[in-house]
C-alpha cells in the first residue's frame, strides 16, 4: 500500500480469485468453475468477423447482444442490462442501491465478492448464517431494511432455492432491491426472470462465464424493472459507457442464438456432474445436491485441505475454502468426462494412502 491510497481503503481486502497457473497446460483446472468446452463455433466466427471493426467504439446500447437477449428471454431491452462480466453489474448495483443509509445483507457463506464490494462502496454488510445444512433460509431475509444479495444456486454450496422461495424474499422486501445472482442457474435451478414484471425491486443477474463457456470474454447481463435498469445505466454512463466491447457484443449475440450448442453443453455438464457425484459418494464423500457446474463435498476421513493439496501435487487444481464450516469440504468444478475420470482416479489413490 502506498501513502497515496485513499484512507477509506486502508483496510480493503481485495477478492482473491482461484489460482490461474501460468503453466496452464500442466494442470487440469477444476478450481474456478469455468467450462471445459469451447465457446459456440458461431461465437468464434462472430469474433473473427468483427475484428476488422475494432477501430470503432462499440454501441453503447449493447446491440446486437440486447436484441438477442430480448428475443431469447422474452424481455424488452428496456429491462435488460449488459456488463463486463456479471461482477461489473454487481459492482454497479452496490453503487446504485447501497450507501450510507442503506446497508446490504447476504449469506455468510456465499460468493466472496459480495463482501469486497460492500467494503469498496463503504456499505454496512450483514452476513446472515446459512442453516446447519448450508441452506439459505428465506425468512431470515424478510423485511431486512437492506439491499439483499443472494446467489441462487449458491456458491460454494451448490444448493438452490425454489422459485417460490426466491419470490417470498422479493415479496417480503417491498422497499428494498433484491439481487438474485444466477451465475449457475442454467445447470438445473429455476430462474427468477419471470418475476421481473411482477416486482419492481428485483434484479436478476446472469453471466456468459459458466454455462456459455466464455469466462475469458467477460460478459454479464441482468434483468429487472425499468426503474432499476435505468439506475444501473446512470451508473454505467458515469463510469464507462462502452463497458462491453465489440467482440463481446457479437460473441454474446451469437452464443445466445446457438441454443442447440448451449443445451448440448449444459446437459453434458449435468450428466458428468451426476456421474461424478455418484463416484464420490462411493469413495466416502458426502456430496451436497448440486444445481451448478461444481460439487461441494466432504470426505468421511480426510480433510478438505489435505485433498486439495494432494490433488494439486498430481496436477489437478480444485478449490478449498478456509473457514470453520467450509474447511472440511472441497469444491470441484465439473470438467469434461475425461478430466473427471482422471481426477477420480488420482483421488482414489490419494484416499487409499489414508486407509
Ligand atoms: C462466477 C460468478 C460470478 C462472476 O461472473 P463473471 O460474469 O465472470 O464476472 C458472479 N457470481 C457468482 C456467484 C459466480 O460464481
Image (spheres, rainbow, N blue to C red):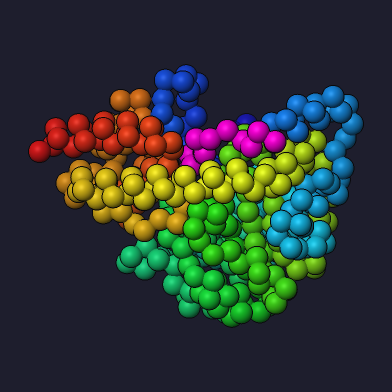
* Outermost front residue: 260
Residue 104 appears in the picture as rendered: no
Residue 223, percent from left and from top: 71, 61
Q: Indicate left or right for 104 with 74 as reference.
A: left
Task: Kindly identify the residue that appears in the image at 50 percent across and 35 percent down.
Answer: 36
Q: Name the residue nearer the viewer: 346 or 235.
A: 346
Q: Is residue 132 above or below residue 300?
A: below
Q: Name the residue nearer the viewer: 75 or 108.
A: 75
Residue 314, percent from left and from top: 30, 25
Residue 98, percent from left and from top: 67, 63
**Quarter holding residue 347:** top left
Q: Name the residue nearer the viewer: 59 or 16.
A: 59
Task: Kindly identify the residue that appears in the image at 66 percent across and 79 percent down.
Answer: 174
Magenta span: chief secondary structure: loop
Q: Is residue 87 above or below residue 145?
A: above
Tell me the quadrant of the picture where the N terminus can be found: top right
Residue 313, percent from left and from top: 30, 25
Span of residues in magenta: 32-43
Amino acid at each position: 500500500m502506498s501513502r497515496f491510497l485513499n484512507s477509506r481503503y486502508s483496510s480493503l481486502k481485495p477478492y482473491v480469485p482461484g489460482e490461474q497457473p501460468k503453466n496452464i497446460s500442466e494442470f487440469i483446472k477444476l478450481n474456478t468453475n469455468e467450462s471445459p468446452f469451447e465457446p459456440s463455433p458461431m461465437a468464434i466466427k462472430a469474433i473473427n468477423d468483427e475484428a476488422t471493426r475494432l477501430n470503432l467504439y462499440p454501441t453503447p446500447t449493447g446491440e446486437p447482444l440486447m436484441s438477442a437477449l430480448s428475443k431469447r428471454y422474452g424481455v424488452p431491452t428496456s429491462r435488460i442490462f449488459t456488463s463486463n462480466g456479471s461482477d461489473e453489474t454487481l459492482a454497479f448495483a452496490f453503487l446504485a442501491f447501497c450507501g450510507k443509509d442503506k446497508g446490504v445483507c447476504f449469506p455468510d457463506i456465499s460468493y466472496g465478492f459480495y463482501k469486497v464490494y460492500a467494503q469498496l462502496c463503504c456499505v454496512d454488510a450483514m452476513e446472515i448464517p446459512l442453516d446447519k445444512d448450508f441452506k439459505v433460509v428465506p425468512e431470515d431475509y424478510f423485511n431486512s431494511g437492506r439491499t439483499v444479495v443472494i446467489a441462487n444456486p449458491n456458491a460454494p454450496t451448490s444448493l438452490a432455492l425454489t422459485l417460490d422461495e426466491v419470490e417470498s424474499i422479493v415479496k417480503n422486501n417491498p422497499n428494498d432491491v433484491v439481487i438474485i445472482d444466477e451465475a449457475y442457474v442454467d445447470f438445473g435451478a429455476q430462474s427468477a426472470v419471470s418475476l421481473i414484471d411482477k416486482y419492481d425491486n428485483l434484479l436478476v443477474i446472469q453471466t456468459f462465464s459458466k454455462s456459455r463457456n466464455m469466462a475469458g470474454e467477460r460478459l454479464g447481463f441482468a434483468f429487472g424493472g425499468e426503474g432499476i435498469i435505468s439506475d444501473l445505466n446512470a451508473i454505467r454512463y458515469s463510469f464507462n459507457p462502452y463497458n462491453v466491447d465489440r467482440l463481446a457484443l457479437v460473441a454474446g449475440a451469437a452464443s445466445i442464438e446457438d441454443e442447440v450448442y448451449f443445451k448440448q453443453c449444459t446437459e453434458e455438464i449435468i450428466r458428468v456432474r451426476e456421474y461424478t457425484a455418484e463416484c464420490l459418494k462411493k469413495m466416502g464423500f458426502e456430496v451436497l445436491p448440486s444445481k451448478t457446474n461444481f460439487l461441494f463435498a466432504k470426505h468421511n476421513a480426510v480433510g478438505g485441505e489435505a485433498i486439495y493439496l494432494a490433488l494439486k501435487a498430481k496436477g489437478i487444481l480444485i478449490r478449498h475454502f478456509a473457514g470453520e464450516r467450509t474447511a472440511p469440504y472441497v469444491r470441484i468444478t465439473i470438467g469434461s468426462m475425461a478430466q473427471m475420470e482422471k481426477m477420480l482416479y488420482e483421488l482414489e489413490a490419494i484416499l487409499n494412502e489414508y486407509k
